[in-house]
Image (cartoon, grey):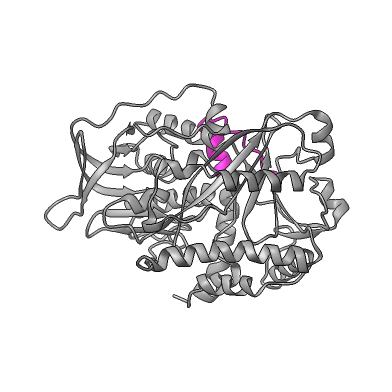
Amino acid sequence: MLTPPRSLWWSTLKEPVVPRPALSSFLDVDVAIIGGGFTGLWTARELQRRDPHLQIVVLEQSVCGFGASGRNGGWASALYPVDDDAVIARYGHDAFHHQRTTLQRAVVSLGDAIAADGIDADYVRGGTLTFARSELQARRLRASVAHAHERGVGADDVRWLEPAAAAEMGSLSHMLGASYSPHCARIHPARLVRGLADAVERHGATIYENTTVTRLRPGSTSRRPELWSVGGRVRARVVVRATEGFTATFPGHRRDLAPVYSLMIATDPLPPSFLHDVGFAGGTTFADDRHLVIYGQRTADNRIAFGGRGAPYHFGSTVEPRYDANDRVFTLLEETLRELFPSLPGDIAYRWGGPLAMPRDLSPSVNLDMSTGLAAAGGYTGDGVVLSYVAGQALADLITSPDTPTEVTTLPFVQRAGRRWEFEPLRWMGINAALGAATWSDRVERRRERTSVASRALDRLFSQPPR
C-alpha cells in the first residue's frame, strides 16, 4: 500500500485517513477517472454539476490526495508556468488576455466552490508578493511590472511596491521592494483534496482507493474504452487520465510529462513576537526573484510552510517513494528560510516532498479524443491548484457538450497536442542541466550582482516556437 508522506498537511487533517475499498468487480459506467487528485476530483465534481445522472467512478492508486494535490505549497494562484511573452508568441494577444482573465477569475470561483461544498481548507485570498532582495532583482521585477502594463495588464493585477508598502503585508530580510498580485489565495491543500473527495462522493460518484490501473485499452467505433486493475475492470464511455506527476509510470506515457521533485519544510507554530515582525497575517504568499523556484506561506496555525526546487530529475522518469526526501535539499531549504527570516526561532518540524509533472514546453494540456474515448489533463509544473480546477471544468464541458465552445474549452492549452520529451539520456541531461543552470545563475547574481550567461541558456532550453 502506498502511504502519503508525513507532511504538515497530512499531520494536521481534522480526521484520520481511512482508505476506501479497492475495486473488486466489473463496472460499466459513463466516466472513469484515473487519479484521485485535484484534476480527477474537480473533473468529477464539474461533471456532476452539468449532469447529475452520470455514473462516475474515480480510481486512485493510494488515497485521494496522495500525489502533488496533497503535498504542494498551498498556493491557489493565477500563475501560468509559461512566460507571458511566450504565451503571446505561441497563441497571440487575444488568447493571452483570455487565459489571464480566466485564471484570475478562477482563483475567486475556486474559493466559492470550496465554500459551496462546505470544505474547510483555510482559503484566504491575500495575493502574493515576489520580493527583490538585490538591486539586480529589483531592476528585473520593476521591468517585469512595467512590461506587463505595456501588454495591457492593469495596475490592479500587478504592481511594484516600495519597501515600506511591501512591509505592510510581509517582510523578508534585505528586501528592496516587491511586485504584488492580488490573484492568489493561501490554502491547506490536503484538507481541500480530502474534502473534495468527500463532496464528490456525496454527489453520487464512487471512489475506489488502493486501486492501481495496470492496463488501459482505447475505445473504437465498435467498443468502449476499458481499464484493468488487479481486482477488477471498468468499461466507460470516457476514461480520463489525471495522473500528473505519476504519468510516466503509466504504460506508453513515459515521455509525456517529466516527474520533477519539489520539496518542502515547515516550522512549529511561531511566537507572536516573530509573527508581529514578519507579518503575512493576511494570507499573502511569498517568494523572491531567484531563478531556482521558492515559495512560502504563513499557515492558518501560524507556521511557515516553505518549499523549493533543486532535487535532481531521476533517469528514465522514475518515481519512487525514496525520492520524496533529499537531505541536501532539505538542508538548503532550511538555510534559505533562515536567510529570509534571520530571527526564525525553533527547529524545522516537517520535511516532505514529491513529484510534479513538467511538459517539454512547460505548457499544461487538456485533451479529449472522442474517437477513442480517452481524455487527459495535467502538466502544471507546480501551478496546479487553480489550473487543475480550470482543467476539470474544461474536461466536463468537452465530455458533456463537445460541440459547444465555452470560456474554458477555448483556452489555448485545451485540445492542444504537446511535444514529447526526448529519449534518455537526453532527457536526464537536459532537465538536470536546467536545474544546475538555475542554481549557478543565482550564485552568480549573489556574488557579482550581474545576470549569468547560464540564465540566458536556461531561457533557451525550454523556449519553443509558436504552435
Q: Is residue 181 left or right of residue 231?
A: right
Task: Identify the residue at the far front of this view.
Answer: 328
Which residue is at the front of the view, 46 or 146?
A: 146
Residue in the picture at 51% in, 70% down: 462
Q: Which residues are magenta?
A: 110-126
Q: Please state the horizontal and vertical placement of residue 111, each as a whole percent of the image.
A: 58, 40
Name the quarter where the C terminus is drawn.
bottom left
Q: Please state the horizontal and vertical placement of residue 310, each as a whole percent of the image.
A: 57, 54
Q: Which image quadrant for residue 177?
A: bottom right
Q: Is residue 442 left or right of residue 319?
A: right
Q: Please state the horizontal and vertical placement of residue 134, each as a whole percent of the image.
A: 79, 62
Residue in the picture at 38% in, 63% down: 415
Q: Please state the horizontal and vertical placement of residue 226, each as a whole percent of the image.
A: 19, 46
Name the quarter where the N terminus is drawn.
top left
Residue in the picture at 26% in, 42% down: 213
Q: Which image quadrant for residue 346?
A: top right
**Residue 26 seen anywhere in this rendered image of the structure:** yes
Which residue is at the front of the view, 434 or 200?
A: 434
